[in-house]
Amino acid sequence: MCLSRCGLSARNLSVVIFLSALASACTTGRAPPPAPVDESLSLPEGGVYKVGNPYQVEGVWYYPSEDYSYVEEGIASWYGPDFHGKRTANGERFDMNALTAAHPTLPMPSVVNVTNLENGRIVKLRINDRGPFKSKRVIDISRQGAQLLGFKDQGTARVRVEIDRDESMTIKNQFLARAPGEMPKIAAAPRASVSSSPIAAPAAPSDLPPVKRAPPPKQARAAPQPDSPTPQRAIPGKGKIDLPAGTGVYIQAGAFSDPANAHRLEQQLREFGNVFIVTVTVNNQQIYRVRLGPLQDNEGAQELLGQIRSFGYDDAQIVRF
């Protein structure tokens, strides 16, 4: 086709094609599907790659695993100010304005695509925390993620959560490369030379020497056992602190009116030692207090308190009963 015959230049032709496509889109009445929101998933400061052991919350067992085929639909909720600036379950600082989320079992970190089934919006999030711990809820999203998905004001939404295998594997390798101490250590097999030699034929029964039976061994007297060593409490990044179990000294790390927030903190502090939730009623309202202990070494308790406060829980305090 000759453009000069039609009186069109190449530039004018491109404009016509664009306007034709635009008119076609307008006549169909269909808007293009929303593109996934994909902000930078660069490595945050702090935090380690972590899967974790099975754990129980309110009678329900959760089994963390590397499930790179995970897809699930359910209810999403969001969390923000109560945990902003505090540590997540893998040791990062929670930022309610970042695109992160909490999940009961997926590796930390891993990357998931979350689709709001009520409006079609899609957001890519990085899992770095544990939760939610309420029936039929499959993911707890940062405030920013909830805003982009369009359900911040209503509080919850029905979503589909699908793990991004390739990005999850990539970020896992990045975290392990940065903190190789978190990688499992497997001893190398010895490389000894292999040789063979002929084995003599077994002797005939008549040629076998008589069997001499050894006298029964004397019963060994059990050695006296020393006193049990002082139990050790693992402190992330700080080795171990001596914390003898006691009967009246505790650390109260936080108090919440929402039990889900209390259970989240309980999971985040499990590596510090024995952590539990106490339910009390104050002004006709149930309050859920998260405590560690019992302890009897005040010096160790003070050191543990400092560690917990360094995780962002500035209201943590020592309580005695």
Image (tube, rainbow, N blue to C red):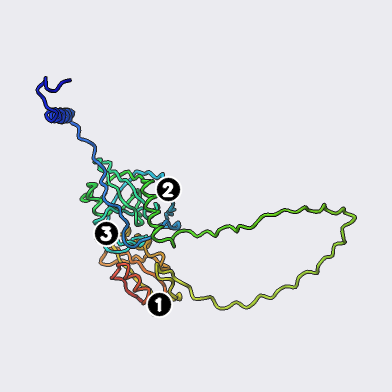
Q: Residue at x 73, y 73 (%)?
A: 219
Please tell me whether residue 18 is drawn above or below residue 98 in the rendered image. above
Q: Amino acid at mark 3?
A: Asp
Residue 105 is labelled as none
- Label 3 Cα neighbours within 10 Å, binned few <14 / some 14-19 / many ≥20: some
Q: Alpha-carbon distance for marks 2 and 1?
A: 39 Å
Relative placement, left or right, of 25 versus 132 is left
Q: Alpha-carbon distance for marks 2 and 3?
A: 25 Å
Relative placement, left or right, of 153 versus 214 is left
Nearer the N terminus, badge 2 or badge 1? 2
Residue 111 point in image, percent of width and height = 34, 49
Residue 69 point in image, percent of width and height = 41, 44
**The quadrant where residue 310 appears:** bottom left
Viewport quadrant of the N terminus: top left
Residue 300 is labelled as 1
Q: Residue at x 57, y 78 (%)?
A: 226
Residue 304 point in image, percent of width and height = 37, 73
Nearer the N terminus, badge 1 or badge 3? 3
Q: Amino acid at mark 2?
A: Asp
Q: Is residue 39 visible?
A: yes
Please tell me whether residue 297 is drawn above or below residue 185 in the rendered image. below
Q: What residue did someone put label 3 on?
A: 95
Q: Is residue 57 visible?
A: no
* The residue positioned farthest toward the right in the image shown: 206
Residue 137 point in image, percent of width and height = 33, 49
Q: Amino acid at mark 1?
A: Gly
Helix, strand or loop for disc 3: loop
Camera-nearest label, 1 or 3: 3
Residue 67 is labelled as 2
